[in-house]
Amino acid sequence: MLEGLFGNKSAEKVMLSIFINGEIHASAIAQQHHTALDPIKKQLERFEEAGFLKSRIVGRSKLYKFNDQNPLIKPLKELIKIAKKNENFNNEIGLL
């Protein structure tokens, strides 16, 4: 559902995973969605460069989370919340 908003499936997967988990590394996102790691890493880098995400290094992992200093993050989280709720509703009634 969010693919149209974010432009591609990798972007949708990244945003949903960060929304659900709060903070996460690229390989965990790839594992959750049974997808390749490279497109996830590229999308994380794009979102970080755009100021939507920020990262920190913990051991050998780079963890990403929303950049709450960005004024668009609060409305973005609301959109994701609404889309996720709508997706769950559509799953329940058999539309997805």
Image (cartoon, grey):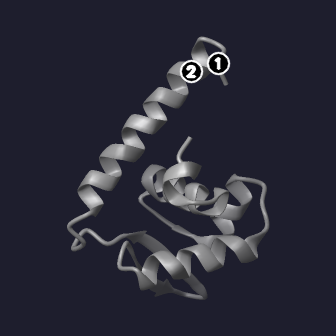
Q: Give the side of residue 36 with respect to residue 71, left or right.
A: right
The amino acid type of the residue labelled 2 equals Asn
Name the residue at 64% across, 18% down.
95
Looking at the picture, how far across and down is residue 15, in whole percent?
49, 58
Read off the residue under disc 1: 95
Q: Is residue 48 above or below residue 19?
A: below
Q: Is residue 2 above or below residue 17?
A: above
Name the residue at 44% across, 30% down.
85
Q: Give the side of residue 32 with respect to residue 51, left or right.
A: right
When asked about the image quadrant of residue 35, the answer is: bottom right
When asked about the image quadrant of residue 52, the answer is: bottom left
Rendered-image quadrant of the N terminus: top right
Q: Residues within 10 Å of mark 1 (few under 14, many from 20)?
A: few
The residue closer to the viewer here, 47 or 65, is: 47
Q: Residue furthest top?
A: 93
* Label 1: which secondary element: loop
Q: Residues within 10 Å of mark 2 (few under 14, many from 20)?
A: few
Read off the residue under disc 2: 90
Name the residue at 47% across, 59% down.
18
Q: Earlier in the sequence, mark 2 or mark 1?
A: 2
Name the residue at 31% across, 45% down.
78
Q: Is residue 82 above or below residue 60?
A: above
* Label 2: which secondary element: helix
